[in-house]
Amino acid sequence: MAESPNETVHLKRSLGLLDVVLFFVITGSNLQWVATAAAAGASSLSVWVIGCFAMFVPLAIAVIYLNSVYPEEGGLYVWAKHAFGPFSGFMTGWSYWTTNLPYFPALLYFMIGNALYVSPGGDALRTSASFFMLCSIGGLAIGTVLNIFGLDVEKWLNNVGAVARWTVTLLLIGVGIYAWHRFGAATPINVHTIRPTVSVKDLIFWSTIAFAWTGPESISLIAGEIKNPRRTIPLGIAIGAPLIGGIYILGTIAVLVAVNADAVNSQYGVVQAIESIASRAGWAILTPAAAVLVAISCMGSVGAWLGSVARLPFVAGIDAYLPSAFGKMHPKYDSPVVSLLTQFVLAAIVVVLGQGGTSVHGAYDVLVSMTVLVTMVPFLLIFSSAIKVRAPGIGVSIPGGHKTVVAASIVGLMTTIFAIIFSTIPAADEPNKPLAVLKIVGLTLVLLAVGAAFYGVAEWRRRREVGVSTAPL
């Protein structure tokens, strides 16, 4: 890999353990999955636990191992490149970078749906596609601008977002406890109701939960800016994991206690639950406060993902697979400005394409499914890389060594394949199922094809230059 002209930037270690833990919380959890899980009923509580051991634990083991072997910035791009060659590395990085394109709109749609609870008149805007599109693009702009100012500035949005996420989760849990004591659980939660089921609808939901447990891999993308990454990253995962689990499982229980599962809206179920109890208890101020906290936490996620994933095209640009502009940093703020602006433009386009021909809720479902599908593609190579890469003497802190890594990665690989298959099935209430499938699969294939084209053109140019330079005079 060629050196960056700004190599000194990546030797700057500005993120400590607290920053890493909060980064894990903000990238490894999201309240939108709490709402999605609650809408699926009490059986989702078992699915959360299964998903943790089927995806989060294997992924955490793979990330800790691969990062100990290749701790440089670039993360999964570097891992796949060393394991399977330049094309696999590039496509892993490219597909992971493109995961943000549908993820941002889905996350921002969730944020907007909950934020509308701030005002009593917000109901009138819940079905306004233009309102959701404009606000989503505005949220993208804010996250992009803060990241252009660099991680020293943007990390505060991450940290505040993580604190806001746990604050609203604690508020949700408190409301749930009050509701259980005062009114009883709106959704029955017992041994029979938490038993997982395996209908097609349930399996689609399982794929979403598998995606919800991803996130540990994102820290590797900014490993170059973490103090002592080989020690800090595993410790950060160990501290952050129970916090993430608490947000998901306790948050889901609280929503189910406050609202009957059949009435939970997957797009704004968190604030819906708080509003349901707050209105009955006479605590009107809780609803807008919760809406603001959810919005802040979502913006924290937008900022964190924008900043971390933007470094993938930066690294690939240095390797000459992308236009050279991707390898340049902002002259003052040392941020990958071209990559950030490109993400902003492409994500804004996905907002418009995802919304076309469907309702606001339909667009949200399509964006979530597309996010799951696109995201799971690079995980095929992350787990495969962990299986293939062998580095004696490195990663020995994992009990069982590489055998444990291989076993965990096989579990993660099977979970990933399962999630990919079922993410292509549209929701049962989607009015235009063929169009939904076309969007989910078609846009994913287009994004992958564009990446393959970039790589193919770069390789053709490289071989042509090598041929010219070695031709006899």
Image (spheres, rainbow, N blue to C red):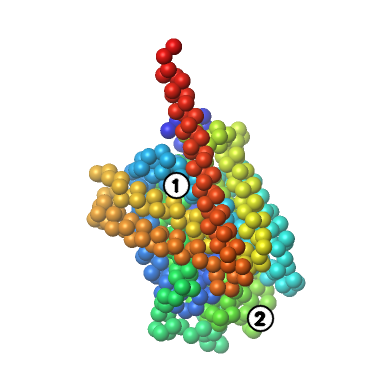
Foreground label between 2 and 1: 1
In terms of secondary structure, where does tag 1 sit? Answer: helix
The picture places residue 207, in percent across and down from the top left corner, at 46, 65
In terms of depth relative to the viewer, which is nearer, 2 or 15? 2
Q: Are there few (<14), some (14-19), or many (20+) residues within 10 Å of tag 2? A: few
Give me the residue at 49% from left, 33% from top.
458
In terms of depth relative to the viewer, which is nearer, 145 or 379? 379
CA distance for labels 2 and 1: 48 Å
Check disc 1 and report the residue beneath it: 92
Left or right: 130 with respect to 230? right
Q: Is residue 260 above or below residue 140?
A: below
Give me the residue at 69% from left, 61% from top.
132
Q: Are there few (<14), some (14-19), or many (20+) residues within 10 Å of tag 1? A: many
Task: Name the amino acid, label 1.
Answer: Thr
In terms of secondary structure, where does tag 2 sit? Answer: helix
Sequence-wise, the earlier of marks 2 and 1 is 1
Give me the residue at 45% from left, 56% from top.
376
The picture places residue 418, in percent across and down from the top left corner, at 41, 63
Task: Name the amino acid, label 2.
Answer: Ser
Check disc 2 and report the residue beneath it: 279
